[in-house]
Image (tube, grey):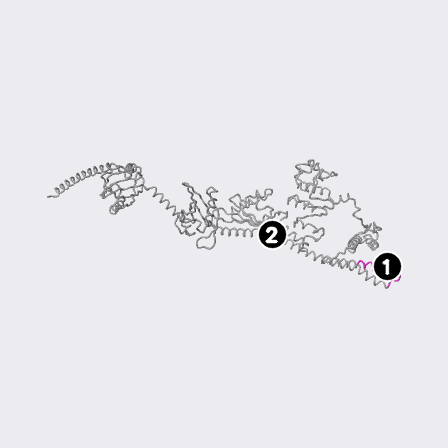
Amino acid sequence: MNTEQNQKVLLEQLEALKKENEQLKKELSILRNENISNRPVSFKEKYAVRILDSLPDMLTVFNQNEVGIEVVSNEETNHVGISNKDFKGMYMREMVPPEAYQNIHSNMRQAVSTGAVSTAHHELDFNGEHHHYENRIFPLDEEYVLIMCRDITERVTTQRQLEVFKSVLDKVSDSILAVSEDGTLVYANKQFIEEYGVTQQMGTQKIYDLPVSMTTKEAWERRLQEIRDNDGTFAYRAAYMRKGEDKERMHQVSTFLIRENNEELTWFFTQDITDVIKKQDELRELNLLLDGILNNIPVYLFVKDPENDFRYLYWNKAFADHSGIPASKAIGHTDYEVFPSHGDAEKFRKDDLELLQTHKRIDMQETYLSANGEARIVQTLKALVPMEGRKPLLIGISWDITNLQNIEQELIKARIKAEQSDRLKSAFLANMSHEIRTPLNAIVGFSQLLPSAETAEEKKLYSGIINQNSDILLQLINDILDLSKIEAGTLEYIKRRMNLGEVCRTIYAVHKERVKEGVTLVFDNEEEDLLMEGDQNRIMQVITNFLTNASKFTYEGEIRFGSQSISDIQKKELYRSIALIHQNVVVLDGTLRDNVSLYESYSDENIKQALIRAGMGDYLNETGLDFTIQESGSNLSGGEKQRIAIARAFLRNTPVMILDEATSSLDSLMAAKIEQTVLQSDTTILNIVHQLKADSLKQYDEILVFSKGAIIERGNYDELIQKDGIFRSLLSVMSA
């Protein structure tokens, strides 16, 4: 029998077997139906179809040869691209890709061989999307197998996202923790687990069993209530120790409360800020140290930002003291805002722009008025400081060289003074030699003539000349001795009660015969007595010197002297001799003219000149002399009232002017200008001050320092500075 005949026989046998198989299936079905019909139907059996249709899984039945028998789930679950109707009779390898088939095939063989459920996974592209599937394979009997195929794409995606999320959280430096309402750890990232010794599985470990800030259940419950009271968001700092360490570290903790399905989940994000705080503290200390250095160095320091209209970024204390402008009013402002009333702002801006353009530092010498009105000379250096990622900053450094300049000037003055002193010394010695030689020659000459005198009258005459010249010589020597005592600072004053009338009568008796011929010495109140307290010898010396000088340079006429009690002087005379400028000025209701003249007869021109000298020239041009001043000067500023009082003093032109804090209401520039005007006048100035200004004090002939109503120091500026006493201490304190 050939091959073709063998194939024909086999096909016929196969066809016969199929028919026999179909017949057996029909008989089996009949038997099953009869069996079912003969027993009661269960709930499961009754609703089996509906239950199967309600499942989201695709349920398929294959025989052990992997031929599709039936899809027992509804059409909606079908995801293989083959309808339920066409499923029957198709092989599994025809339905799925080769890689998926191999996985399902292997697990199906395992389920058939073991009789146990097996699980397989595969992936398919369906409707243009990639899907993940889970297959659970159930052996139904020796012939059929049930495969439950579920689309787990969403679950896989979520799982992968969760894995990525966990991986990211494990890599961050923060410690992250999720805690349920009862304090159970639900999640902890790698950082938290390692640092705080989480030893148990998630879902069993309690937060208050860990070395964190909430060490008891009660502490956890209090913290949870705090978070709830703050709408589920709360931040705080806590100090606790990490695993294996013995020192507490500071942590910044942020919390978020999430409610889902009536359950609370609290997330903790914990950052160790111990090192940050330490660095901040170190930086703060460094800044304080740097600020302390910059605020205590004797130079004026400032920093400007060219990117922000040259606004000040820094302004040290020395600059604030020098300018009278605190740092708070300078930082963040431009020169035009800081110095609105001066013309310096435009100059500063010009220098800044030049520096920014040329990048060449500026080194210059400038003169300014300090906050207390002193003219100070400063050396200024401006330069650019390079900055990364932006324009450079402008830094300015100035230091006061006034003292250096003054020292140079003083050295020059000292040299000139020394040269003058040398010349004066020579002239003094020459003059003293002449002055001493004159009476000494007379004494020697007439002493030699005295023995040869022939008559008593001649002897009397010679003796008188010798006595007279002896007195002159003695006075010269006493004057020289007093001068040396004054220079040495050893001259003493002995105060006691004395009769000035008697002193003057004694002096008159001595000098009335010493005047030249043709000159008469007149003592106006020879018979009067005047009791006073003082050093009698010094007063006699002063009066004698006055009379001696008068006699020496008077060649004809009268020399008059006498005394008068100040109580006898009329108040009107004192008023016309003394002008008082007080800090509390009384202003009258009336015109500007009347307030300056005080209703006395002065020309308008003199009144105007007085106002101009008092710094009210601009005010006068705007108002005129007929301007009406309202009650108590309500339409005048404090400075304007002060200048009216000064104008009154200028107008009266008294021999003596007393200033009692007369410029206290004026700005430093105006005060300095008026004081200079006063000092240039031909007037004796008595200035009472509490604010010491070196440049001003240097111009006065004598300075008196009072304490509790007594004079404790006196002398000119240089003498008091060299004395290094109270005056110098006060000046140093006020200049600091």
Amino acid found under the numbered disc labelled 2: Ile
Magenta-span inclusion, residue 462 = yes
Q: Report the side of 733 relative to 442 (left or right).
A: left
Amino acid found under the numbered disc labelled 1: Leu
Q: Which residues are magenta?
A: 452-472
Q: Earlier in the sequence, mark 1 or mark 2?
A: 2
Q: Which residue is mark 1?
A: 461
View extreme (right): residue: 455
Instruction: Please say if 293 is above or below 570.
Output: below
Decide which of 310, 39 is in the foreground and name it. 39
Is label 1 or label 2 in front? 2
Instruction: Tell me the CA gap for discs 1 and 2.
Output: 69 Å
View extreme (left): residue: 1
Where residue 68 sits: x, y (%)? Answer: 24, 40
Looking at the rendered structure, which numbered label has been put on residue 401?
A: 2
Task: Tell me the element at label 2.
Answer: loop
